[in-house]
């Protein structure tokens, strides 16, 4: 199988090359050039496998230039080394009669990005070997919180890689900042930037497009790469857990073999829900994919009206990892909706860039609505959902997950569809403890407590252990104290790598 660009670049590359490069040379995203289908017997056979076997089974169909041994090695490094605190890696927990939580936050940083970011570095290292790459890979990340820490944990001590994470010094939560500045590992660097997330991200983009620096890097034996969610190597590990959830539900007798399910995903950059779309295309019995947004409801509007309009106010919400106005991974779905016509995709992407909007009509819109349903949850609704879900089912949901649950409930009211539904639970409630504690105990009761005190409060009152990745965080030694101005980010890279 080969990978082609969504924007018509004439080349085609192996999966190793696609993973190494991240973006296609024309700025498009890499997509497989052939469809992968599993037959019903294959899907059922997953019920008898453990998570790592399931992962190899799915990955090998897309990454067919990797050997089975290479994939098994990557998978056991990611999921078999005790970094996840659930044996099943992504366990399914029954919430109510028809709703099931797919818990994706049992990894080292307590959010779903670990599932992909524990595997991606290993896939990159193998890709470098397979393509005879001589340079050391330097991963640069600009983060608003979750991605940076998950990438640091994924790349720490991975041979042949270095990682530099920039975060807005005043723009992340207390827990998120402590998670990053206490990061261990011989190849990791963390730098605070005086400014907001946009400043930080623009700084990293400027470094990526700096031709002179690129030349200096090459002479010193380094090459930049990115770990963001448009990399195919981040998407494909996410397909695995939807099959895994289905296999677990069949094995537990919650659904019959072949029975259709719905999948609800709290969505930002459209990576996680796109993975569920690939699973559906591969033959996983799925009725609807339910796209849940917060107040940044650009995708709700797109799916319901066909108009994608990024010209709107950016809202800071209590589900910050979904505060996104341009959902990059949507481009892969657009490519398929347009019948794999790159010219059409280029047209839409140019309109988005130049006019801030584009629209889809007719057959493309009809196909979209056949597969997707969308709604959003306001801040108040999200808070109420956290409280109600805790009171009714004893389940602690983080704000991102609560957006998913609220939108699922709206779907049931709107459609009456009682199909069993898997809801992606994307972060541990302990990670976003201020909003969670405020929702269930009331703001008065938590006034004046810092996030570390809130961890203890939540743990004690709800009878749940603080996850290992967050326990004792306040006492860990600070290992990274670099802070710079936006204009100094390039110099920081030169210093850190010792470039000459
Ligand atoms: C990144 C993230 C999301 C959004 O996922 P996308 O793949 O970007 O749509 C949702 N919830 C949490 C907790 C996240 O970290």
Image (cartoon, grey):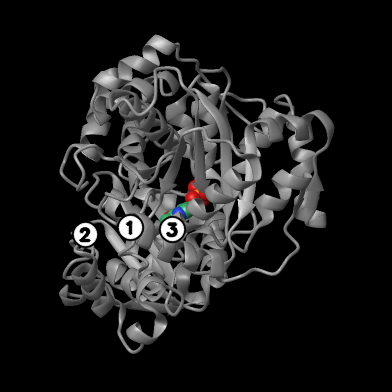
Q: Which quarter of the image is occupied by the C terminus?
A: bottom left
Q: Residues within 10 Å of mark 2 (few under 14, many from 20)?
A: many
The residue identified by callout 3 is 141
Disc number for residue 466? none
Mark 2 C-beta to ligand 1 under 8 Å: no
2 vs 3, front mark: 2
Q: Residues within 10 Å of mark 3 (few under 14, many from 20)?
A: many
The percent coordinates of residue 384 (x first, y second) are: 48, 67
Distance from disc 2 to disc 1, alpha carbons, whole Å, reads: 8 Å
- Say if residue 14 shows up in the picture: yes
The residue identified by callout 1 is 428
What kind of element bears circle 2?
loop
Q: Between residues 206 and 315, which one lies in front from this camera angle?
A: 315
Task: Name which residue lies at 72% across and 29% down.
Answer: 367
Mark 3 C-beta to ligand 1 under 8 Å: no
Q: Earlier in the sequence, mark 2 or mark 3?
A: 3
Q: Between residues 155 and 296, which one lies in front from this camera angle?
A: 296
Mark 1 C-beta to ligand 1 under 8 Å: no
The percent coordinates of residue 208 (x first, y second) are: 53, 55
What kind of element bears circle 1?
loop
- Say if residue 7 shows up in the picture: no
What kind of element bears circle 3?
strand
Q: Does 482 appear above or below 216?
A: below
Task: Name which residue lies at 25% across and 19% down.
Answer: 48
- Kindly indicate whether the residue at mark 3 contacts the one at mark 2 (C-beta within 8 angstroms): no
The percent coordinates of residue 316 (x first, y second) are: 56, 71
Distance from disc 2 to disc 3, alpha carbons, whole Å, reads: 25 Å
The residue identified by callout 2 is 467
């Amino acid at each position: 199988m080969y990978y082609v660009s969504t924007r018509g670049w004439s080349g085609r590359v192996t999966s190793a090359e696609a993973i190494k490069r991240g973006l296609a040379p024309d700025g498009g995203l890499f997509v497989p050039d052939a469809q992968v289908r599993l037959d019903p017997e294959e899907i059922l056979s997953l019920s008898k496998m453990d998570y790592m076997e399931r992962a190899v089974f799915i990955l090998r169909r897309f990454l067919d230039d990797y050997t089975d041994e290479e994939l098994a090695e990557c998978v056991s490094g990611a999921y078999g080394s005790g970094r996840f605190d659930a044996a099943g890696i992504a366990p399914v927990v029954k919430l109510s009669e028809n709703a099931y939580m797919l818990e994706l936050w049992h990894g080292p940083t307590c959010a779903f990005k670990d599932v992909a970011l524990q595997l991606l570095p290993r896939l990159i290292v193998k890709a470098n070997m397979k393509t005879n790459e001589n340079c050391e890979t330097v991963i640069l990340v600009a983060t608003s919180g979750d991605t940076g820490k998950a990438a640091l944990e994924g790349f720490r001590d991975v041979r042949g890689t270095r990682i530099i994470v920039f975060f807005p010094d005043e723009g992340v939560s207390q827990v998120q900042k402590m998670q990053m500045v206490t990061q261990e590992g011989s190849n990791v660097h963390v730098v605070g930037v005086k400014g907001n997330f946009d400043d930080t991200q623009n700084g990293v983009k400027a470094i990526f497009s700096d031709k002179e620096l690129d030349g200096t890097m090459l002479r010193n034996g380094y090459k930049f790469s990115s770990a963001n969610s448009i990399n195919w190597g981040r998407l494909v590990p996410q397909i695995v857990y939807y099959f895994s959830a289905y296999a677990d539900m069949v094995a537990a007798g919650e659904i019959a073999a072949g029975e259709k399910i719905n999948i609800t995903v709290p969505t930002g950059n459209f990576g996680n829900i796109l993975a569920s779309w690939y699973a559906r295309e591969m033959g996983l019995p799925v009725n609807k994919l339910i796209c849940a947004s917060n107040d940044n409801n650009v995708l709700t509007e797109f799916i319901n009206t066909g108009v994608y309009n990024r010209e709107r106010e950016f809202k800071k919400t209590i589900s910050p990892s979904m505060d996104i106005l341009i959902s990059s991974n949507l481009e892969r779905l657009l490519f398929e909706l347009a019948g794999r016509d790159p010219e059409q995709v280029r047209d839409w992407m140019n309109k988005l860039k130049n006019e801030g909007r584009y629209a889809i009509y007719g057959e493309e819109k009809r196909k979209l609505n056949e597969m997707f349903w969308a709604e959003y949850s306001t801040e108040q609704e999200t808070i109420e959902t956290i409280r109600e879900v805790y009171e009714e089912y004893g389940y602690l949901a983080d704000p991102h997950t609560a957006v998913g649950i609220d939108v699922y409930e709206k779907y049931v009211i709107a459609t009456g569809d009682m199909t069993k539904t898997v809801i992606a639970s994307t972060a541990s409630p302990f990670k976003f403890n201020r909003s969670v504690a405020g929702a269930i105990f009331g703001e008065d009761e938590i006034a004046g407590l810092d996030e570390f005190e809130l961890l203890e409060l939540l743990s004690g009152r709800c009878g749940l252990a603080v996850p290992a990745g967050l326990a004792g965080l306040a006492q860990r030694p600070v290992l990274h104290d670099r802070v710079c101005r936006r204009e100094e980010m390039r110099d920081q890279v030169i210093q850190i790598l010792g470039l000459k």
